[in-house]
Amino acid sequence: MTERDIPTDETLTLIASDKVEGTAVFNRAGEKLGTIHNLMVDKQTGQVEYAVLSFGGVLGLGTDYYPIPWESLTYDTEQGGYVVDIDKETLKSGPHYGTSEEPAYDRAFGQSIYVHYGLDYPLA
């Protein structure tokens, strides 16, 4: 095996962020909620705090972005995507933003996300 044969974007327990982006997210009923737009990573710990879902819109126009706690996603190999215990209405009523209005992602915004999904916000 040469160095070129070693996978660099996915192993048994790790995956490159560019392979996660664009992955479908489904609820437990099998409805597609959106796709992962990007990941928000804590600069100090290196832990992924949020997956930002893109939902709605056509070709990026009218798309809204919904950050959800990373810990709420589970990868399902049969679905070929992540599964969450969130229905569409809960997602739509959650913290979100449009293309031109990205939030500060400060502690208050983070707490609002975790509270909305019924989770405890990680301590700083």
Image (cartoon, grey):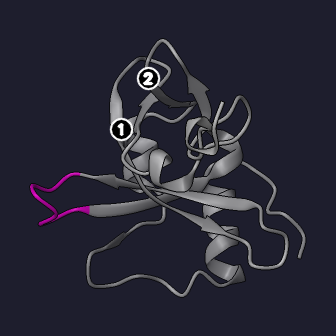
Residue with the mark numbered 1? 33
Q: In terms of secondary structure, where does tag 2 sit?
A: loop
Q: Marks 1 and 2: in contact by CB < 8 Å?
A: no
Q: In terms of secondary structure, where does tag 1 sit?
A: strand
Q: Of tags 2 and 1, which is closer to the observer?
A: 2
Sequence-wise, the earlier of marks 2 and 1 is 1
- Quadrant housing the N terminus: top right
Assign the magenta stretch its main secondary structure.
loop
Q: In this view, does 113 lie to the left or right of 91?
A: right
**Splitting the image into 4 quarters, where does residue 24 fall?**
top left
In front: 6, or 114?
Answer: 6
The span shown in magenta is 56-63
Say which amino acid is labelled 2. Gly
On the image, the x and y values in percent for residue 93 come to 41, 55
Give the residue at x 15% y 56%.
57
Say which amino acid is labelled 1. Leu
On the image, the x and y values in percent for residue 109 come to 61, 77
Q: In this view, does 78 lie to the left or right of 89?
A: right
In front: 48, or 121?
Answer: 48
Residue with the mark numbered 2? 80
